[in-house]
Amino acid sequence: MDIGSNLVAGIVGADYYLYGPIENAPMIFPAAAMVDIMKAESAKELGLKVLAENHPITKTL
């Protein structure tokens, strides 16, 4: 399964991903978080702030 093609919907604002069987969840969740981080970085370049406290961009390892 190609996770990248399924994440295109997230780039344009979707909150729900159709990724197939539950066994694919470990692949889709980090990828979906990365899409959110990329959108937040783009928003910062436009002078916007991420207000959600639990947004993936605020998480540290």
Image (cartoon, rainbow, N blue to C red):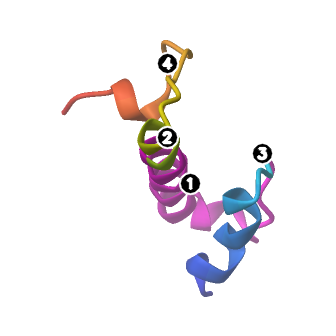
Label 4 or label 2, whichever comes before in sequence order: 2
Q: Mark on residue 40?
A: 2
Q: Which dot, 2 or 1, sits closer to the camera?
A: 2
Q: Mark on residue 15?
A: 3
Which residue in the protein does label 1 denote? 32
Please name the amino acid that badge 3 sits on: Asp
Distance between the alpha carbons at the discs numbered 2 and 1: 13 Å
**Quadrant placement of the N terminus:** bottom right
Please name the amino acid that badge 2 sits on: Ala
Helix, strand or loop for disc 2 = helix
Q: Residue 43: image x %, image y %?
A: 52, 41
Which residue in the protein does label 4 denote? 54
Neighbor class of circle 1 (other Cα within 10 Å; few <14, some 14-19, many 20+) is many
Distance between the alpha carbons at the discs numbered 4 and 2: 13 Å
Helix, strand or loop for disc 3 = loop
Neighbor class of circle 3 (other Cα within 10 Å; few <14, some 14-19, many 20+) is few
Please state the extent of the stretch shown in magenta in the rendering: 15-41
